[in-house]
Amino acid sequence: MAVTQQSNEQDPMSAMNMTPLIDVLLVLLIMFIITIPIATHSVEMNIGGDDVVIPAPDPIKNKIVITNRDALRWNGKEVNMKELAALLDATTQMTPEPELQYEPEAQASYDRSVKVLNLVKQSGVTKFGFVGNEKYREFNLGE
């Protein structure tokens, strides 16, 4: 039988008891996990399937372009704000309403763009989209 000798000397413990430290760390970890909010946001997206019918492309599209000289074009033809308002009113009366595409050029003035966008909003156009944004993916500050 093995007998251990106990020394009467009071030597300090050379090893730290790790159990309480690990217990505290586990409790803190559990508290952090509990306090993390549950992800409630989601983006619902129909990725298609066998039963999804793809609609035919709409052949009627109108494009508004603001040039660098602040000229306003409707499907390539230069128009003024009154003519644009009349054209927008005419398109809102069509069934189905044609898609309106908006493509200002790079150096078009912000003021002119805001006026055109306000006119589009006031006309009640429901199918509106910005096109050509991919051209401005990288902005060069030095140019």
Image (tube, rainbow, N blue to C red):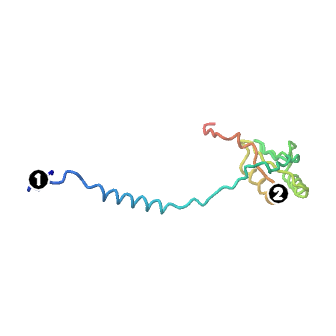
Residue drawn where x is 40% and y is 60% of the image: 28
Q: Earlier in the sequence, mark 2 or mark 1?
A: 1
Residue 75 image-quadrant placement: top right
Q: Is residue 10 left or right of residue 78?
A: left
| Residue 53, disc | none
Total residue callouts: 2
Where in the figure is residue 77, as x and y percent of width and height? 87, 43
Mark 2 against mark 1, which lies toward the viewer? Answer: 1
Q: Are marks 2 and 1 in contact (CB under 8 Å)?
A: no
Q: Is residue 11 left or right of residue 120?
A: left
Given residues 132 and 38, the one toward you in this image is 38
Residue drawn where x is 66% and y is 41% of the image: 137
Where in the figure is residue 2, as x and y percent of width and height? 15, 51
- Disc 1 marks which residue? 5
Q: Amino acid at mark 2?
A: Val
Quadrant placement of the C terminus? top right
Given residues 22 and 73, the one toward you in this image is 22
Q: Is residue 66 above or below residue 123?
A: above
Q: Which residue is at the far top?
A: 143
> Alpha carbon of mark 2 to alpha carbon of mark 1: how far?
95 Å
| Residue 125, disc | 2
State the SS at label 1.
loop
Where in the figure is residue 127, as x and y percent of width and height? 81, 54
Q: Amino acid at mark 1?
A: Gln
Q: Which residue is at the far front?
A: 1
Q: Is residue 48 above or below residue 28?
A: above
How packed mark 2 is, by other alpha carbons closer than 10 Å (few <14, some 14-19, many 20 or more), is some
